[in-house]
Image: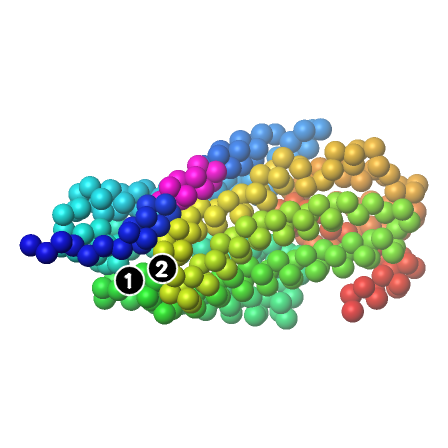
Amino acid sequence: MPPPQTNLWLERTRLGGMMLGGVFYGIFTLLTVQAAAALMQRPRHGDKIANNRLVLLCYIFITFILGTVNYAANARYTEIIWIDLRDAPGGPLALIENALDYSINVLALSTYFAMGWCMQALLLHRCSIIWYRAKSVMVPMIALCSAMFAVSILILIQANHRAVFFFKINTMLLYFCMELGFTLTYTILVTSRLLVMRCRMKQAVAQYNSSTYDTVILMLIESAMLYSVFCVIVVVSIASHSDGVSNIFSISMTSIQGIAQLLVIVRVARGRALTHEWPTRRVTAAPAAPTSIVFSRTLSGIIDGTDLERITTPEQDGVPLYSVRSVKATEAEACMA
């Protein structure tokens, strides 16, 4: 009997990718527990419990189930490769290359796409709130999201109807590129909008402290950067046919998706997106600024006799945005151009 073919680099990277996936799954689990605990706590200072708390709790519960199933499926197939079927024809190398011949890997792939759909829905919701559901923004974003959904369904059909190495599916490269583009587009749209709002407030209100917007913008960029870096690595490795590199990072992608959003949810639920100095800071002759990020739907105030109205009805995860209607607002309109 001829010895099975070997590719030690591919086998090592598959095992190394599983170990790296375990690290990120642990982080994902920890952030899930922290987010759930923060959302279930009653806000301090007598504030009302967030209106959308249950929605966020359902979101993190669903994504945790998806992430757990994905990691469990990958862990089980790792056992199959080196324990259950280690003497199968072709050895571990054949099992790695023909992973989609086994339904457990199709299940793992399905949970990855389902996690992506949840993340895209959340990002679309945030974008629609920040941009007041503007058609010029939402139509392209929804179209891109719909295209990603269609491509993911096509990949699942391909995975079920023919034996093929996962990274040899051409549409997989397309999907990763679209997902990377979607994440970057969302980040640019939301951060640019927040920068405009910050500019308007600084021009309309004397001595306005913009640390709120600065912190929220940094929080969004940090969240997007984590997943984007992994996406870039996987895209480059697939395009260059570096299957070993793809093995290392692909297993962690589902957990990374969850971590990226939980970083925002945890900080917002704990009110950390605002600095602790807010309670003592005041705008000239104005009431104190909000002391924490809240989830309430209405808020108004008077600053120097100026009517301070909300730009949006709900906030992006409770981030308050304001529009100033005064003589100074004319100058602030220049920031919208």
Residue that numbered label 1 is attached to: 165
Disc tally is 2
- Quadrant housing residue 243: bottom left
Q: Residues within 10 Å of mark 1 (few under 14, many from 20)?
A: some
Q: What is the C-alpha distance between the residues marked 1 and 2?
A: 10 Å
**What segment carries the magenta color?**
18-28
Q: Residue at x 44, y 46 (%)?
A: 255
Q: Residue at x 53, y 48 (%)?
A: 260
Q: Main secondary structure of the magenta part?
A: helix
Q: Residue at x 64, y 31 (%)?
A: 43
Residue 226 location (% of width, % of height): 54, 50
Q: Residues within 10 Å of mark 2 (few under 14, many from 20)?
A: many
Picture quarter with the N terminus:
bottom left
- Quadrant housing residue 15: top left
Front label number (1 vs 2): 2
Amino acid type, residue under disc 2 in the picture: Asp
- Quadrant housing residue 151: bottom left
Q: Secondary structure at mark 2?
A: helix
Sequence-earlier tag: 1 or 2: 1
Residue 29 location (% of width, % of height): 45, 37
Q: Secondary structure at mark 1?
A: loop
Q: Is residue 175 magenta?
A: no
Q: Is residue 105 shown left or right of residue 187? A: left
Tag 1 and tag 2, C-beta contact below 8 Å: yes
Picture quarter with the C terminus:
bottom right
Residue that numbered label 2 is attached to: 243
Residue 224 location (% of width, % of height): 57, 53
Q: Is residue 27 magenta?
A: yes
Residue 150 location (% of width, % of height): 40, 67
Amino acid type, residue under disc 1 in the picture: Phe
